[in-house]
Amino acid sequence: MHPDEIAARIRKHFESGLNPFLASANDEGLVSVRKGTDEAIQNFYAQVSAKTASQLEKVSGECSQLRERSTETASQLETVFGEECSQLRDASAKSTSELQKVSREYAQLSEDVTVLQDDKERLQADCDALDEENVALRTEIEARDEHIEALQEDQVGYRRGAACRSLYTTSIDQGRSSSTVDEDAIDIHLWDLVKEEAIHHADPAKSLPPRL
């Protein structure tokens, strides 16, 4: 607020307090009172202005010192932290570059994982198909083994029959006609036939049945 405005307000309040007295006073008294009031206001204004100016000057000096200290502090901070800030900026730029590189590698790895997953599913399907084929082949092999066993049984029966016929014919040739043939003799003769067959295939006595 401007000092003149302050003085006007003081004068107004002072005069409002003296209104009852001023109403009964003559013009000379009013002029005297007004003159005293003006002097009091001027004195008060001068004191306030002087004190305010002194305080303002003091504050201004302090502000100047603060500005100087602030400038000095900023210079010191720039000197102390300038190099560190520069290093931090360089490190940040390097970290950003490395992060981008890692992100690209991660994206490539993700694509590779997707491809490998597709290959895995395709190989799993192939393995399932091979397992089914293996089961079918095992079933076929078992059927063939059963068929071979049946053929071997038929072959053994055929050989026993041949042995019986051979022994029966031999007995007739030797004049020993008989309606029955000794079973032990048939097995012995069958062993001899098997042995002769093994020798014929150059694999003597290999996996021959035990002679009874």
Image: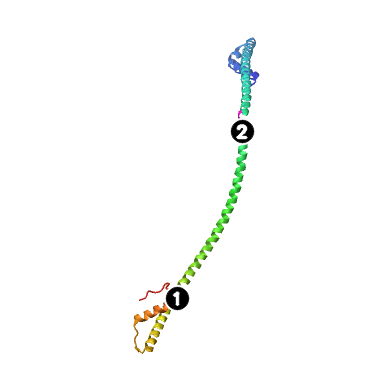
Quadrant of the rendered structure where residue 191 is? bottom left
The reply to whether callout 1 and callout 2 are in contact (CB within 8 Å) is no
Q: Residue at x 52, y 63 (%)?
A: 127
x and y percentages locating residue 113 in the rendered image? 56, 54
Q: Secondary structure at mark 1?
A: helix
Q: Residues within 10 Å of mark 2 (few under 14, many from 20)?
A: few
Q: Residue at x 60, y 18 (%)?
A: 13
Q: Residue at x 51, y 65 (%)?
A: 130
Q: Amino acid at mark 2?
A: Cys
Q: Secondary structure at mark 2?
A: helix
- Assign the C terminus to one quadrant of the image: bottom left
User: In this view of the protein, which residue sits in the foreground, 68 or 83?
Assistant: 83
x and y percentages locating residue 51 in the rendered image? 61, 15
Apparent side of residue 67 relative to residue 174 in the rendered image (left or right): right
Q: Which residues are magenta?
A: 80-89
What secondary structure characterizes most of the magenta part? helix
Q: Residue furthest front?
A: 174
User: In this view of the protein, which residue sits in the foreground, 147 or 162?
Assistant: 162
Residue that badge 1 annotates: 199
User: In this view of the protein, which residue sits in the foreground, 57 or 208?
Assistant: 208
Q: Compared to 185, does 145 lie above or below? A: above
Of the image marks 1 and 2, the number of the one nearer the N terminus: 2
Residue that badge 2 annotates: 85
- Residue 25 shows which numbered tag? none
Quadrant of the rendered structure where residue 61 is? top right
x and y percentages locating residue 180 in the rendered image? 34, 86
Q: CA distance from mark 1 to mark 2?
A: 99 Å
Disc 1 or disc 2, which is closer to the eye? 1
Q: Compared to 158, does 76 lie above or below? A: above
Q: Is residue 58 magenta?
A: no
User: In this view of the protein, which residue sits in the foreground, 33 or 126?
Assistant: 126
Q: Residue at x 60, y 16 (%)?
A: 14
